[in-house]
Every structure is written in C-alpha cells, then in structure tokens.
Amino acid sequence: MVDNTKAGNILRVEGLKVAYGGIKAVKGIDLEVNKGELVTLIGANGAGKTTTLKAITGTLPNCKVEGSLHYLGSAIKGNHSFDLVKKNLAMVPEGRGVFTRMSIHENLLMGAYIRDDKAAIAADIDKWFSVFPRLKERSAQMAGTLSGGEQQMLAMARALMSHPTLLLLDEPSMGLSPIMVEKIFEVIRNVSAQGITILLVEQNAKLALEAAHRGYVMDSGLVTMSGNAKDMLNDPKVQAAYLGEG
C-alpha cells in the first residue's frame, strides 16, 4: 500500500486497474508523487504507462477503471480533464498535441485560458520564451510547421502556462533527435529545479532515472520495482532490462 500520511502528497494512486473489454491494460498498481518531486514511470512499450496517465487525467476512452486516484487529497476518479486543469493538473500528451493552425504565441495563450491575469500571462510568456529561445524566434509561426522537437518545447511551455501544481509528461523524447532529446531533458531538469512537481513517463530509462528523484518500473500492467532513481540506475535487473547493460 502507498503511505497516505506523508506530508506534501500531491498524487496518490492505489489499486488502479484499467480494462478495455477483456484486455487488462493496468492490473492493480500503487504509486505516489510528493511535492517537489520528479518521479518517473519507465517500462517497455505497451507496459501500461500511458494508460495510467490517461486514467489519472480522465482522458481514457470508454473502459473500466477501478481503484482510487487522489490529487491534493481529493478523489479525482471520474473527473473531466477540463476540471482537472482548473485544479492545476496539466499533461503534455504523447504526440505533443499542439494546435497546428495557431501560432506559437496563440498556443501559449491557450495554455493560460483558465487565467485572467493578463500582465502575469505576458510575463510568463516571456519567461518560457527565455527557456525556449527557439520558440521566441518563431512566435508568429504556425505550430504545425515546427519540427518535432520544437513542437515538444511548445507543448511543454503551453502546459506550464497553466501554473501546474502537478505536470504529467508522456514520452517527451519520443521521435526526437539525440540532440533534441538532451535539450528536452535539460528543460525537464530546469522545470523540476523550480519546484514544479512532475510525473514523467518515458522509454529512455537512463535519462529519465538520471533526472528523477524516484522511479517506478512498469511491466505488463504491473509495477515490478520502485525506489530511489539513482539506486535503480545501478540495479543489475534495471540495467539488463532497460539500460542495455548487464
């Protein structure tokens, strides 16, 4: 069982099961994310990682979800995604999901649609432009014309415009060049250093564990290992299965 008493608990998942018809994608997992942590969920493709994030954010298609989901101490299972955004829970989905026919600047404004503090919104756009200078150079450009890496930067900046208490990142390095992957992880570490709590789903186990405080390994719908991220980096079983070592 997950420890419910720990101070600063942001997200608590207990006994989560997700089934699509007769297919059990998630088979009863527990995990938690505490204030200020960067927690990563690693595992092979098809392990159930993205399904877990979609269950948390209420973005799954019709399927059976069992177990409990608590965010900031309140049950959120069954909440709509737009309600969760109002509670400062944001997700950068796999595939980025930028508004392709809007400019970079317009995408960032969409990230702040729940806010009405115009001066602070403008200041935040400047802030994230300083973190992502490529976006600033192309602020009037349509998002659909950006490279994959630039779209990933935009999707992250857009999510951060909502001032998330918890930021969920789903496979941010997928399909990117090695140089761009390094840049994205540099930004993830930067965001974490600012105190923003992050749950990161990622197939690049090495980079994810190097950046994270704690990690969970998911395999065939189950959490098979969890612990301190640095310890997991040195674990022979993790090295053999996910790091190409051992």
Image: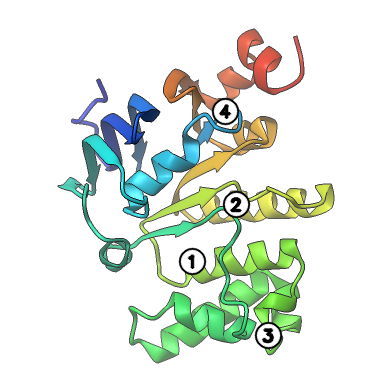
Name the residue located 74 percent from the left edge and 77 percent from the top edge: 145
Marks 4/2: CA distance? 19 Å
> Is tag 3's residue or tag 1's residue first in the polypeptide sequence?
3
Earlier residue among tags 3 and 2: 3
Three-letter amino acid code at the position of disc 4: Gly
Which residue is depicted at the point 43% across and 41% down?
51
Residue 135 visible in the snapshot: yes
For disc 3, the marked residue is 139
Q: Position of residue 122 (x, y in %)?
A: 50, 87
Residue placed most toward the observer, 51 or 24: 24
Q: Residues within 10 Å of mark 3 (few under 14, many from 20)?
A: some
The circle drawn on residue 160 is 1
Q: Residues within 10 Å of mark 4 (few under 14, many from 20)?
A: many
Residue 241 appears at what percent x and percent y?
66, 16
Among the two numbered marks 4 and 1 on one chain, the one whose residue lies closer to the N terminus: 4
Number of the label disc, if any, that sits on residue 188: 2
- Give the amino acid type for the residue marked by disc 3 in the picture: Ser
Q: Is residue 36 found left or right of 173 in the rendered image?
A: left
Give, as a three-letter code, the residue at label 1: Leu
5 up-or-down from 235: above or below? below
Helix, strand or loop at disc 1?
helix
Q: Quadrant of the N terminus?
A: top left
Q: Which amino acid, mark 2? A: Ile
Give the residue drawn at x 62%, y 77%. Answer: 100
| Mark seen at residue 43 | 4
User: Which of the marked residues, 2 or 1, is nearer the chain's N terminus?
Assistant: 1
Q: Nearer the viewer, mark 3 or mark 2?
A: 3
